[in-house]
Image: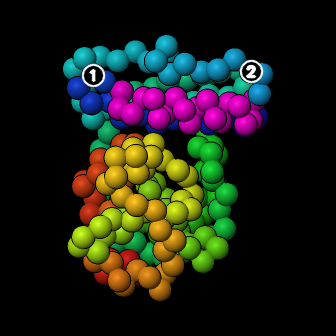
Amino acid sequence: MCRFIETIRVERGQACNLQLHQARVDATMARFFPGSPGVSLAGILSLDPGWDGVKCRVVYGRGGAESVTYAPYAMRPVATLRLVEADIDYGYKFEDRRQIDRAFAMRGDCDDVLIVRRGMVADTSIANVAFGDGREWFTPRHPLLPGTRRAALLRDGVVGELDIRVVDIPRFSHIMLFNAMIPWGACCLPSGSIR
């Protein structure tokens, strides 16, 4: 059976970007399980006011939410990225990440992979990315997964969208990794860290 996950950052006892997470859950349910009961994230979360930097993981499917777990979050260190060509279809946040795990296994001596799909830079195995040139930041127009933090950054004008090919990377000075758990600015690498 097809199952999906939603990963939500909890800061100061509050679920971050909950409306964007809910919109993604709603779109996923409508696409894969039309007519099934929805999942109300606000209705199933049980947050402690003292929680900060906590990862909430919701697993759901046709019958609704199947599990909700909470754990302290520690970001895996990333200092180098290996370019990997992989035609991965991950437009929804599937629980099954085998395609991404196969790409990650090709990282060699690097910390993570920067996935190139159909000639265009997409995401790392765990995060959306943006490239900076010293003035502006651009996120790939066609990511593996349109993340909730990415949606917020686009909405707020922090990043713009751009088709980015491998040959375009040298025109940028930095690459930023971000996702629901990794805040903007927490993982910024020089573009020379991409091999």
Q: Position of residue 52 (x, y in %)?
A: 24, 30
Distance between the Cα atoms at labels 1 and 2? 30 Å
Q: Quadrant of the N terminus?
A: top right
Crowding near the residue tagged with mark 1, few <14, some 14–19, many ≥20 C-alpha atoms within 10 Å: some
Earlier sequence position, callout 1 versus callout 2: 1
The three-letter code of the residue at mark 2 reads: Ser
Location of residue 160 with respect to 149 vertically, above or below: below
- Asked whether residue 61 is in view, the answer is yes
Location of residue 156 with respect to 163 vertically, above or below: above
Mark on residue 179? none
Q: Residue at x 65, y 62 (%)?
A: 88
150 with respect to 77 (left or right): right
Q: Residue at x 77, y 22 (%)?
A: 35
Location of residue 90 with respect to 10 vertically, above or below: below
Secondary element at image label 1? loop
117 with respect to 78 (left or right): right
Q: Position of residue 134 (x, y in %)?
A: 23, 73
**Residue corresponding to mark 2:** 36
Location of residue 132 with respect to 92 vertically, above or below: below
Q: How is the image coloured?
A: rainbow
Q: Closest to the observer: 159 or 4?
A: 159
14 with respect to 81 (left or right): left
Q: Closest to the observer: 98 or 27?
A: 27
The three-letter code of the residue at mark 1 reads: Gly
Secondary element at image label 2? loop
**Residue corresponding to mark 1:** 13
Q: Residue at x 24, y 55 (%)?
A: 185
The magenta segment? 15-33
Q: Position of residue 65 (x, y in %)?
A: 60, 22
Q: Quadrant of the C terminus?
A: bottom left
Asked whether 186 falls inside the magenta stretch, the response is no
- Asked whether residue 105 is in view, the answer is no
